[in-house]
Image (spheres, helix red, strand yellow):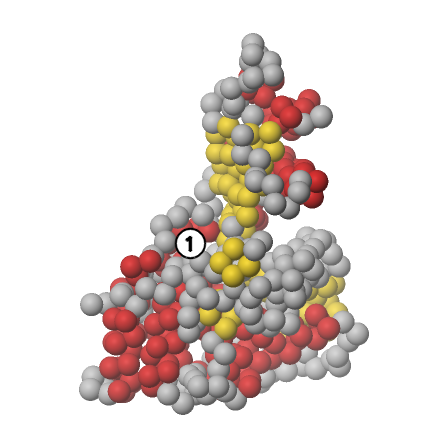
Amino acid sequence: MKVTVTRSGGFAGITRSWHVFVEREPDEESWVVLLRKLPWDEVTREPSQPDRYLYRINCEPRARTDRPDSRDAPERILPEPREAVIPEQRLTGPWRELVDRVRERDEEKRELRPAAAPDDNT
Amino acid sequence: MRPPVVRPRTGPVANPSQPDRAISDAGGTETLPGRIVRREGEPAVDDASVNEAYDGLGHTHALFWDAFERASVDGAGSPLEATVHYGDAYDNAFWDGSRMVFGDGDGQVFAGFTTSLSVIGHELTHGVTQYTANLVYSGQSGALNESVSDVFGALVEQHSRGHDVTEASWLIGEGIFTDEVEGTALRSLKAPGTAYDDDVLGKDPQPAHMDDFVETDDDNGGVHINSGIPNRAFYLAATSIGGNAWERAGRIWYETLTGEIKATTDFGGFADATIAVAVRLYGSESPETAAVRTAWGEVGVLS
């Protein structure tokens, strides 16, 4: 499961993106617990307040190579790709937790990668 | 958008030519409004962000009053309220429907937002727009909402510095980047797409012409991107007219914003409205009207 958070808008209008491969995380189970809590059906489109961020959260199941039986948990929760677009003023609860966690984790990994290395897009 | 809220005035001022300011401190939290730390008429405090916000609100009030006889964002002398120190290393400034909110920046890309008068003017203009044209914050009407905030944000700075069109920087957010960023400002009305070009941030993505209009789902349809097109139209009109930009070009844009345009207007509708205002104010054969018409043609909005 690849979880991608794209943050656009803001006063600067600079789009930034962070991602995590859930199955590569040492604490995969806790990610699964969080993914289960996401209230996909409660997301309603609402206009952004001027200059606030707009978040796009995308969860994409991936073919597993490490566990070919693919009965791993993230894919069972979300067998199909899903996407939610949420204005900053509505980013609360599990959505906020997920966004903060993906960003924090991705930035940690970027600090560990050599600056010249290509982005990990596999 | 919230409906207008009537609040008691916070200070002793009852004169619409004077601002009625209140600056609050969120103390690094995301709870609004925070604690009031400086009210109208109170002396400077030991916090640069508070004082910059206070002064910036004053300069913004001064432009709208001196140039357009408008008393505050609602035109009826409403209090001007701002919150500083919002969030933890929060890299942004916004208008929440009733107040301006400023983060401190993360210190890596942004050094804070209150240091730039054009940023403060930009945010308060979102309030003016909310009470007038109320341009829908999506697609072309959203890019116009952004553009008028940039236009009047730039005019606040020009008016406070006494800069005419040749002296003006035409930049938005000059000085808010840290020294590590390769860039002078966030946006340029004169040359959209040239404000920064940085290894980490990338290049300023603003188009300057309709040929380069960006179709995107992000940023509510690229409202901070495509605003470059009407921004440059204002720059072209203002520099062609000459003098102080807030006097004639600014007057035309102000009366368009506060006139009869629809909340969902597109670039073409806004352009037609500015020409109609120019004709009404200065005459159909005037240099002002010619400048406005030519400007919209040069950016590809009108043929």
Amino acid type at circle 1 is Gly
Q: Is residue B84 left or right of residue B76?
A: right
Task: Name the residue at 57% across, 39% down.
Answer: A119
Residue B212 quadrant: bottom left
Q: In this view, does A43 lie above or below B63?
A: above
Residue in the foreground of this view, choosing between B73 and A82? A82
Q: Where is residue B300 in the image (x, y as percent from the top left)?
A: 27, 65
Q: In this view, does B121 lie above or below B140?
A: below
Task: Name the residue at 33% across, 79% down.
Answer: B237
Q: Position of residue A3 (x, y in %)?
A: 56, 32
Residue in the foreground of this view, choosing between B124 and B295? B295
Q: In this view, does A22 lie to the left or right of B202?
A: right
The residue carrying mark 1 is B222
- Residue B1 appears in the figure: yes
Name the chain under label 1: B
- Residue B65 appears in the figure: no
Q: Is residue B154 left or right of residue B182?
A: left
Task: Name the residue at 51% across, 50% down.
Answer: A15
Quadrant containing the C terminus of chain B in the rendered view? bottom left
Question: What kind of element bears circle 1?
Answer: helix
Residue B118 quadrant: bottom right
Q: How crowded is mark 1: few (under 14 residues within 10 Å), some or many (20 or more)?
A: many
Q: Is residue B252 above or below residue A107?
A: below
Q: In this view, does B241 lie above or below B232?
A: below
Residue in the foreground of this view, choosing between A26 and B28? A26
Task: Name the residue at 61% across, 67% down.
Answer: B176
Q: Position of residue B261 (x, y in %)?
A: 31, 66
